[in-house]
Amino acid sequence: MEMKKGGLEEKAYDFKDIESNSLKYFKGDKLAADQWIRKYSLKDSNGNIYESSPDDMHHRLANEIARRESKYPNPISEEKIYSLLKDFKYIIPGGSNMSGIGNNKQIVSLSNCFVVGNGCDSYGGIMRIDQEQVQLMKRRGGVGHDLSHIRPKGTDVLNSALTSTGVVPFMERYSNSTREVAQDGRRGALMLSLSINHPDAENFIDAKMEQGKVTGANISVKIDDKFMKAVKNNANYTQQWPVDSNNPEITQEVNAKKLWDKIIYNAWKFAEPGVLFWDTIQRESIPDAYFEHGFKTTSTNPCGEIPLCPYDSCRLLAINLYNYVENPFTNKAKFKYDLFRKHARNSARIMDDIIDLEKEKINSTLKKIKGDPEPDDIKYPEKKLWEKILEKTNQGRRMGIGITAEGDMLAALGIRYGSDKAINFSEEVHKTLALEVYRESVELAKERGAFPIYDSKKEKDNPFILRLKEADPKLYKEMTKHGRRNISLLTIAPTGTTSLMTQTTSGIEPVFTAIYKRNVKVEDNDKNKKIDYIDEEGIKWHTYNVFHHKFKEWLRINGEDFNEVKDKNEEELKKIVEKSPYYKATANDVDWIKKVEMQGRIQKWVDHSISATTNLPKDTPQEVVAKVYTKAWESECKGMTVYVDGSRGKAILNSGKDLEGKVKFPEKRPAKVEADILRFKNIDKNGGEDWIAFVGKIDEKPYEIFTGRSEGAMLYIPPTINKGKIEKISNEGESSRYDFTFLNEGGFNNVVGGISHQFQREYWNLARLVSAHLKEGTPIPNIIRIVKKLDDGGKEGINSWKNGVMRALKRYIPNNTKSGETCNICGMPIIFQNGCETCGCGEKCS
C-alpha cells in the first residue's frame, strides 16, 4: 500500500507478489504468511487484495488510530503508533481490529466478543436470540449467551406442545446456526452456558456426548460456591427454575457429587464442558456494580476470557511480552520494566481510540441497515440489536488488553515455566500491567471524560478495585476524583492466530512442544524430496521436523547451527532440548497444580478473565481432572478448561491413531435395523435444497445409507423425529424395497414406504455402492475419500449428493481418527472431531 499525505492510496496487488512479500516478511514462515493473507489483509468481495505485506496493514491501522487520536488533547503521532505495531513487536490489535480498521470494503465489527440475551422463556425470545447471534457472526463477531432462562424439560407450557422440550433442542438450533455462518475463511464461534442450578443441567452437560451433536458451540457450566461446597461435603444440592428466583416454580434435589462426577468424566473424555466459577466472576466483576444500568454479567465470549452483560461487546489487544526481554536466552537477560510500563499506557490509549473506531463501524452498520431494500419490519431486529450494542459501548467503553508470549518470556529469562520463580515473576508482570492501564484510563478520563455511568461509590467494595487501592493509593485517589475512561480494561485471550504472527507461545500458555513432526505430500514429479512412507492409497509422504520459533532463536544465540540440527534424529534432538529453557516446560510437562496456581495468581490482576487450558498427559485418571477443577475454584480462577492428551483434536501433534479397523457385521442383513435421520441443506447453482439421509445402523455403526432431496409428501417426516427403523421388504416376483418406520408423537407407528425408490435412480445406485462398502466394514474415512473422488461429470446435482453422503457419514467417525489427508493451510494431518475435519492450525477444513 502506498502512503500519501493525508491518507492511503489503494491498489490491488498480484497474489504472487503478496505471497512472496509476506513470506519474506515472516522469514519463510509459510503458515504465518498464509494466515495473514487469508484473514487480515485488506480485500474486497471479489478477492482482490490491497495490501502487499503486513507492513501495509500496520500503516493502515496507524493511520486510522492517529485520526482518532488527533481529536483529543496530547495525541500520539501516527509514526509513534506505527512503531508500536510494526513487525508485531510490541502491540498487536485483535484479529477483528487488524481486518476491520480502515476497511472501507466490508462492513464488519471491530469487537471480537459479544454476549446477547433477553431472558425471555418464549419461542419469540428464543428465536430472537438465534437471529441476533447470526447477525453478529456475519460481522465477524464471536458470540456467547446463557440458556438458564429457558424452562426445564417436561414443564407445562401454554401452547400446543403442552410441555417444554428443555434447553437441549435449542442448543442444537444455536449450534447449527453458527455452522451456517462463514466469516472470510473462519466459521462463527459460539459459547452456550447454563447454570448448575438449572434442572436441565445434567442434560446440558451430556448434550455434546452424542456423535455430531452441538458441534458448532463451546459449552460451559456456571458453577456456584454452594454447589462446590455440596460436592466437597457429599451433600445434596437444590436446583430450581427460574434459577435466580426467591419463589421458584420448580425445585429438585440432586446429589452434587454425582453431577460433579459427570462433569469430570465428560471433561476427561471429551474436554467439555468447561466450568465457569460464577460466584467468583460476579463477585470480582467491576461492571456488575452497575447492574442498574444493565451491566449484570450473564455469559462469556466463546473462549471464556470476557464475561459480559447482554448486548455489550469487547475489543482485544495483546502485548508481546517476549520483546521486553533484553539479552534473551543469556545470563544477562532481564525484563525491561520501564519500557513495558510506557507501552502498557500506550496500549490503553490505542484501545480507547479503537472504541471510537468501533462506534463509527456500528453507525456504518446502522446506515447500511437503513438503506437495505427489505421491509422495515424485517430489518427491525438487526437495527435494534446494533442500537443496543452502541448504547452499551457508549456507557462502558469496555476494552480487553492482554498479553501473548508468556511462555517465551519466561524461557528467554531462563525461568522454567511452572516453577515458583516463574509464578512470582509472572504475577509481578501482570500486576504492573494492571496498574499502568488503569493509570492511563484515569489520565484519559481527565482528557476525554470518564465513562458516562462512572460512580466511585458503586465500586468501592469491589475486590479488584481494593487490590489496586492497596497497591497504589495515589492511583486510587486520582481515580475517585477524576473517574476512569473505561469500565473494565484487562483480559488474557488465547491469541492463537496472533501468536502465529508474533511467532511466539500463545497467551499465558507454555510452549506446546519445542519440536514436532509435519507431513507433506510428495508429488510424483518431485524427484528431490525424500519419501518417508507410503500410505494405503499409495500416496507418498515426506516427514520433517518443525521447530518452535523462539527455540530456534535459543539455538542461534547458544551457537548451534540450525542447518546441522534440523535433520537430527529424535534421540539427538531430545538431548538438545534438555539443554534449553524449554526442557520440562512444555504443555504436557508443567505440573498441573503449578499451572492452576499461576492462573489464579495472575487472575488477581485481570479484571475480566483468562482463557487457559490445563494440559494433562494421556492416561491421566479422572480423579486428577477433578483435582484440577477443585484447585481452580480454591485458587479463585474464574474458569477452567482441561485437555487430556488424545481426548480432542489437538492430539494430532502427536503420532495419533491409524484409521479405524474394519467393522464386522452379520453375514445376513437383519429384518430391521435401527436408523438415524439426518437433515441438511445442500447448495448448488439453484440455491439451497432440503436433503435427508436415512442411515441404517447395527451396533451403532452405519450399515447402509439412503439419501436425496426430501421433496414430496411421501417423504414427509416431522422435524422432531430423528430415529426409527429400516425394514427390508422382499415380495415374491417383486424387487425388494426398504420401508422406514417411526413412532409419532402420539406413540403410533408411521411407515414411509419404499424409501429406496423415493430418490432419483442415479442416487439410489450410488447409495448401493456406498452401502456395499459399509457392509464390508470399510473404514468410514476411506469411504468418504472414495465418494469425494467420484467423477460427477460436472453435474451439480450429483455433487450435492456427494456432499450429503460425506456430511452424513462424518458424524459416525470416532474422534481423533485421521482422515489420511493434510491441511492445505498448515500441512498437518487432518483428523475427525465431532463430525468435523480439524487440523493443527485450528481451521475447520470442511
Image: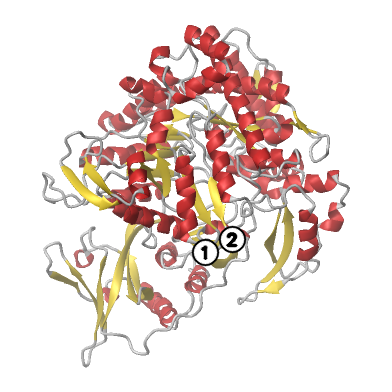
Residue to which mark 2 is pinned: 652
Cα–Cα gap, marks 1 and 2:
7 Å
Q: Looking at the image, is 339 positioned above or below residue 835? A: above
Look at the image and tell me whether residue 687 can be seen: no
Spot the residue most to the front.
233
Name the residue: 54% across, 49% down: 614
- Viewer-proximal residue among 620 and 754: 620
Looking at the image, residue 720 sits to the left or right of residue 333; the answer is left
- Residue at image point 54% right, 16% down: 441
| 476 lies above or below 130 | above
Residue 63 vs 197, above or below: the answer is above
* Place of residue 263 in the rendered image (x, y in percent of width and height, measured from the top left): 38, 54
For this rendering, which residue is in front, 665 or 359? 665
- Say how many tags the image has: 2
Tell me residue 653's x, y (percent). 62, 59
Q: Is residue 317 visible?
A: yes
Assign a secondary structure to mark 2.
Answer: helix
Q: Which residue is mark 1?
A: 816
Give coordinates of residue 565: x percent, y percent.
83, 57
Could you tell me which secondary element the residue under label 1 belongs to?
loop
Please provide percent x and percent y for residue 570. 76, 64
Which residue type carries mark 1?
Asn
Q: Quadrant of the N terminus?
A: top right
Of callouts 1 and 2, the N-terminal one: 2
Mark 1 vs 2: CB contact within 8 A: yes
Is the residue 169 above or below the residue 142 in the image? Answer: below
Amino acid type of disc 2? Ile
Q: Is residue 52 left or right of residue 271?
A: right
Depth check: give the residue in front, 263 or 395: 263
Name the quadrant containing residue 38.
Answer: top right
Left or right placement of residue 22 versus residue 595 in this view: right
